[in-house]
Amino acid sequence: MSKVFIYSNQVFVRKGIRCFLETQDDIRISGDAEVPESRTPDAGTEGIDIVILDLAGLSNPTETIRRIRRTMNDARIVVLCAVNTTDFAVDALDAGAAGIMTHSCQPTELRIAMSRVLNGDNYIQPDIAMEIFRELRAKEAQRTEADRLRLTVRESQVINHLMQGKTNRQIGESLSISEKTVKHYVGVLKEKFCVANRLELVLHAQRLSL
């Protein structure tokens, strides 16, 4: 039988989760409490197999995960977050979470996540996982495109100034080159990026995070 502890600052949330899990024959609820955001987790949490941690409203959720992880070394942490953000999901996993779910998940999905993490796996709610996959593919495409462009140091300098909204004259003064030379580099950059004007050039560079 798996021992579970529930942390949430919202009474309705933690009591609702508790009510559901108490219907599961292989689960024993060891307790529930407010999130120990700036303190050591409560006594009586020894031997916990799974911690369900609601991160809603916390000022430093990743540090809270780390604190619980340090105190309850053997426990697997499943976090509930209010927003579906890929950056946060990655940070939470790095901090020690084993499962990532949102408040929109169904009780059965939470149960699946608990079973998976108990088996030693990490579990990410499918829609979050798909978003992470899409973002990783987009970043890989950006890296591939950036590698293809292979900007020189001077081209990179010029495009960075263009992204700041500077004119050719201002760029020339900043880089100690002539306005004509700046114009040449802008032309080269437009050819490399396959764009027709400066605005398209800047927008393309921003998309690639150059």
Image (tube, rainbow, N blue to C red):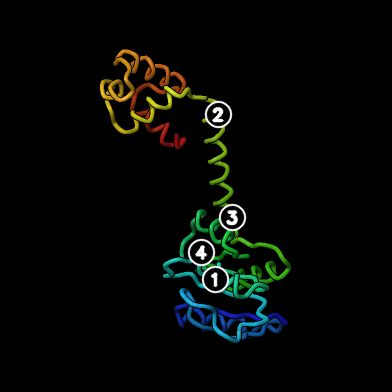
Q: CA distance from mark 4 to mark 1?
A: 9 Å
* Residue at 39% in and 27% down: 157
Q: Is residue 185 above or below residue 156?
A: above
Residue shown at the point (64%, 68%) measured from the top left: 113
**Comparing marks 2 and 4, which lies closer to the viewer?**
4
Pick the residue in front: 115 or 148. 148
Mark 3 and mark 4: Cα distance apart in space: 19 Å
- Secondary element at tag 4: helix
Residue 196 at x, y = what percent? 37, 21
Quadrant in the rendering for residue 126 = bottom right
| Amino acid type, callout 1 | Arg
The image quadrant that residue 92 belongs to is bottom right
From the viewer's side, name the closer residue of 34 and 110: 34
Q: What residue sits right under mark 1 in the picture? A: 67
In-image side of 189 versus 19 (left or right): left
Of the image marks 2 and 1, the number of the one nearer the N terminus: 1
